[in-house]
Image (cartoon, rainbow, N blue to C red):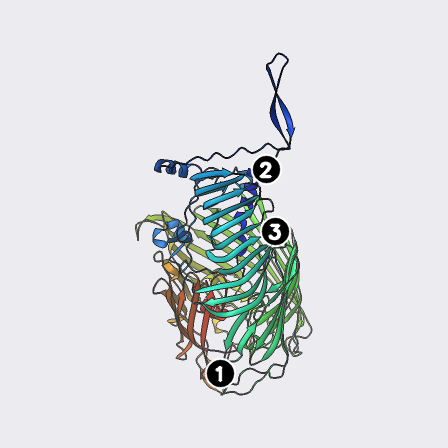
Amino acid sequence: MPRRTTALYLLGLSCGLFSTANALGEATAEEQKTPNTHTEWRCDTTPGGSWNCAEYTAPGPAFAKPPHRALKRRPSATAKKNANTNGPRVSTPRNLDWVDETALTDEQKQSQTDGCCGRYIEPARDYPDAELNPDDAPLRASSTTTEAQDNVATMKGDVQISQGHRQVRSNTAVLDQDARTATLEGNVQLREPGLLMLGKKAHFNLDSGELVVNDATWVFHESAIRGTAGIVARKEEGMIFIDNATYTTCEPGNNTWTMASSNIAIDPQTGMATAKHVRIKVKDVPILYLPWIRYPIDDRRASGLLFPEITFSDSNGIDYAQPIYLNLAPNYDATITPRYLQERGEMLELELRHLSRLTETTLGGGWLGDDDGGDDDDANPIKPYQGEDRWLVNMDHRGGTGKRWGTLIDYTKVSDEDYFRDIGNATLEASSQTHLKQFAGLNYSTDHWRLGVSGTEYQTIISNTHEQYKQLPRVSADGNYRIQAGAQDIVFNLKNQFTVFDHDDNSMVTGNRLRSDYSVTLDKQWMWGYFRPTFKLKHLSYDLDDPLTAGGDDKPTTTVPVGIIDAGLFFERVSDLFGSHTQTLEPRLYYLNAKSEDQSDNPDFDTDELTFSYQQLFRDERFSGNDRISDAEQVTVALTTRLIDSSTGIERLHASIGQVFYLDDREVALNYAAANEELRRDDSDLAAEFGAQLNKHWRFQSDILYNDSSDHVNKGSFSLRYRGQERALFNASYRYTREDPRYLNSVEYDADIEQADISAYLPISRRWSLIGRWNHDLTNSRELEVFGGIEYNSCCWRTALVVRHWLDRDDDELIPEDELKYDDGIFLQIQLKGLAGTGGTLDSILSDGIYGYEPR
């Protein structure tokens, strides 16, 4: 359950050096052995006058032989070349391995960061043992010249040391066997996969493993981060100390922003780093100072301060949230967020997370005591929540991972309907909707059955809308069987649901509902078509506390047999239209027969009429929810054609058209008191949809409902979308829905929905992009939302400025519409890549307003 934190990444600077020091120590272990005895020759005269010589063992070391001083010749050019080509070569870094985009391969450009004019590329490792771990590889070393005196070896001229994938290079290297030290000086270079570090001088202790690197410069290739350090030191006990460190994601030569620290202490044993006097600078101007910060250097989590979030708005003023992370145990943690809202006061948010092998749970909450009410609105100086306590509770739980059983909790509740509008949430994952769901459920699955029990409530957080029913509890049992009887595939579906409905309003009808839908289908499929006859039996019964109407039935029951025949054919041919394609022709026939039963005594707990569309042509229900069983005797005739690219299999075009022909009037209605003239039509609207992939970047989509009796278009939409290179986006759409007019005080108001929407994200250069949206209500001749702005994006930072004018409302119906008011705002987002950012609200605005936009 790792939590993402902003790390300084300096922890890996000395990894390559530490093991190299140990390797050098191992390579000279034999030379370290000092003998306690030595041999000498002793000669005496014999009685006959001859010499008698023998070798004797003498205590102590032998006397060192005086060094032989000899003039060394300057190596010839050929000798130098041979010396430099023997053994592995450490690649010379050029501009910290930064490669301009003009020199990148197509594959390398695919992983290039947005806004960058290049990327860090590691040089190839094509020498022997390059892929081995240093512990498993021999030590290789070379230099132009080597001198040895008194157990001190001096390597000069292009010193190259490698062991497996680890490489070291310098101008000189001095190995002192007596002091057990190694010193590298002049253009020190250290390489490991993904890491390059340069320095002026490096000093090792071969026994203790202590290390000091002076004036270090480093880069991590994959993360595209670089930095400097005055001193990198590793002590004998393993602690790492870094003085005068910097960090940035900007390309070499560009220090738009940097993070600096006077001292960093890293403990590899605990996986924690502590930084002091941390300063974030933009163009060398300090903008943030932290006297102390503690953070993890690996996947281990640790308690400490997270980066704050700072925003500004007209209603709340300055909004500062400072998350504090608490690593309580390996499988659970907490985040406490003190928050200050200038115009409302202080508040506290809390998030607890727990993870086990089978469950994952998040519990959150927010509390604002004695709300100051927010900033005054000149047009409306009333502060409706001034002096009130405001709060939020949220729980998200999922259990039974990988098991047949499962648990689910999705619960959110707020103190008032304006909580998200006024306060929002700085760190919680709760989302704002028109109805907040409060759900808890348990289910169990077998090979053929899924059993479940759940409870659901909703909190309505928009005005002028009735509260929904509570479902306490809902019990379901759904079965599915596929049986092969000879050459026949027979599918059985068994659906059962029992629900208890309750409501806080005593005037609302409450009670129990049982709904059962059983079906059997003969599933016949061939390459050229399919034939699926289905028989269904639908049952609906209630046990109401009171009848829906006086004198009505408080235990209404409905049972309806349903017959369905669904058949289709597939024809195809090779077409040269728009190139080489396969064209299909797919006629479809759908017959539905469902007996009509009076359901006027049935309540409406959770049911609504489905919006008619092309897909509705092939459904056996015209209601959502389970309070009605549709009646019908109808035939649907439809035709679909497609163009499929013969070489890629991509569908380039599809077009479908269909219509329902009613063989008898329908009688079942959601509201029996209404006129319901639609139920007595002889045919449905003509439904059609069309889509085309015009080319690699352009796509067109449309659908339409046309009433051939009145010659009216009841519903239609068209959209043209472009997705190009450099994340370019363009969307143009239009939608129209004919609605019955609304009335207020005997005045008729047009309720048709007719809107046009144009949005775009258009790069105008490598780093600059234009952002905009125009969403217009043609029915009421007004803008719903208009915003425009500009974005700058580079390797190391991104900023966006957007001016927005929008119609803000907290209800789903307001008459007259022209009394709605507008809000205006200026939104600024600044993101220092690899560090932190502000203005998360702007990302939400752009994601909702521009189709296809994804925050970077």
Viewer-side residue, 96 vs 220: 96
> The residue under label 1 is which amino acid type?
Ile
> The residue under label 3 is which amino acid type?
Gly
Q: Where in the figure is residue 579, as x and y percent of width and height?
A: 30, 51
Which one is closest to the eye, mark 3 or mark 2? Answer: 2
Q: Secondary structure at mark 3?
A: loop
Quarter of the rendering occupied by the N terminus: bottom right
> The residue under label 2 is which amino acid type?
Gln
Viewer-side residue, 479 vs 632: 479
Which comes sooner in the sequence, label 1 or label 2? 2
Which one is closest to the eye, mark 1 or mark 2? Answer: 2
Q: CA distance from mark 1 to mark 2?
A: 94 Å
Q: Which residue is mark 1?
A: 815
Is residue 289 shown above or below 60? below
Query: In the image, 487: left or right of 405?
Result: left
Residue at left offset 52%, top offset 80%: 315
Q: Which residue is mark 3?
A: 238
